[in-house]
Image (tube, grey):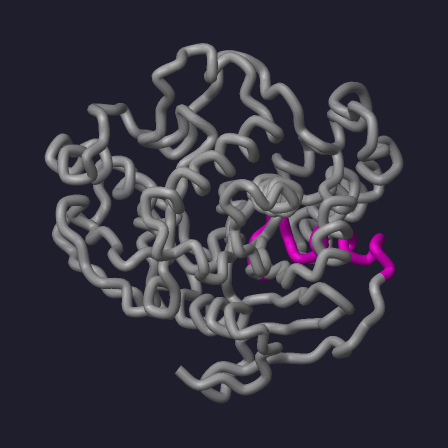
Amino acid sequence: MFGAMGELGPFRINSDAKTLFRNSYAWSNVANMLFLESPAGVGFSYSNTTSDYDHPGDKKTADDAYTFIINWLERFPQYKTHDFYIAGESYAGHYVPQLAYTILRKNKNTKQTVINIKGIAIGNAWIDDETCMKGMYDYWWSHAINSDATHDAIFKYCNFVNDSSTGMCHDSTSKAWDEMGEVNVYNIYAPICLNHEQRNTSATGSVSIDFFDPCWQDILVSYLNDSAVQEAFHARPTSWDICREYISIWNDSAVSILPIIKYLIDNGQRLWVFSGDTDARVPITSSRYAINTLNLLIETAWRPWYLNEEVGGYLEAYKGLLLITVRGAGHSVPSFQPRRALALFTSFLGGIVPHHYKM
């Protein structure tokens, strides 16, 4: 629901947290969309088997998502022959490639439903622990968030591979966060929600390139906890929240998804890594560092892409992978730059490396 109601779905929520308005740049304008809340227990999702909550992890999330897709296609068989793509952001840098990998492996059993997967797109995606951490702190320093001394200390005392949560590394990274101040780490140039209780409750919204309500997460939580809304969604009465903490420890988390990305490339999947360039949590530097370790052949050198005569971002095409940025977008790209995000997604579906796009 986070993505559906706050990013790329057909409707957005007005600032009154009670009414909706149409999203002119919804991705459903160009594709049939399924929004999946997973793993079980996230958002409105649930399991009738309580033990399903006991050992959450990457593998179980991929297996459960695969089971959902198979069951959905069996219920709606008219979509079995359609091209299938998966997209996600942030930790979906794990979820999306792992699900694609699971599908490709399961597709080898031709006695069961074959999912016609064609590619994946991951945005501001956490795909490799070491390079993502290095890229994050380099981004902070290069964007004047951290001092030279703090940046130097982090790279002196942290190895980014083993547990670096103690000692001088811990002191240095803590100082880096302190130096950042009251900034939205997911979009360092966006206004922050200064008063969570006194947002503009009368305003009606429009999805534009100029404004995105800084209190949007409060609005989302309020709206999705309305009993009438939950009934309309056919959801169980739930205390919906942006993040739901698991009681048990996450069972497995790969230190790197790069081997899976290599597998997907080798198996002919379209693979786009996109990045809002004002996100400081999983920034463009992290994506570049991770991709550089693959040593892929460059097919299109770094250049800008345009939307309506303005630079929409920058890209570099490799053999089997496209890295593309979205100018002025934060961690949730379609929230902050909906028009540019739709142009990117449309190009992704068409397998076209964008150059000059009009919308």
Q: Kindly tell me whether residue 189 is visible in this rendering.
A: no
As drawn, 292 above or below 167: below
Q: Residue at x 58, y 53 (%)?
A: 122
Q: Kindly tell me whether residue 193 is visible in this rendering.
A: yes
As drawn, 244 above or below 295: above
As drawn, 259 above or below 275: above
Horizontal side of residue 75 vs 58, given as left or right: left
Q: Nearer the viewer, residue 45 or 159?
A: 45
Q: In the figure, residue 210 lies in which quadrant?
A: bottom left
Queried whether the magenta region covers residue 282, the answer comes back as yes
Q: Residue at x 74, y 26 (%)?
A: 171
For the C terminus, the quadrant is: bottom left
Queried whether the magenta region covers residue 5, the answer comes back as no
Horizontal side of residue 49 vs 316, given as left or right: left
Q: In the figure, residue 284 lies in which quadrant?
A: bottom right
- Residue 79: give x, y in percent of width and height: 38, 56
- Residue 334: give x, y in percent of width and height: 43, 60
Q: Nearer the viewer, residue 229 or 311?
A: 229
As drawn, 43 above or below 204: above
Horizontal side of residue 75 vs 22, given as left or right: right
Q: Residue at x 84, y 43 (%)?
A: 152
Q: Residue furthest front?
A: 111
The magenta-colored residue range is 277-295
Horizontal side of residue 175 vs 168, given as left or right: left
- Residue 162: give x, y in percent of width and height: 82, 26
Counting every numbered tag in the picture gives 0
Q: Residue at x 87, y 60 (%)?
A: 295
- Residue 245: give x, y in percent of width and height: 46, 21
For the N terminus, the quadrant is: top left
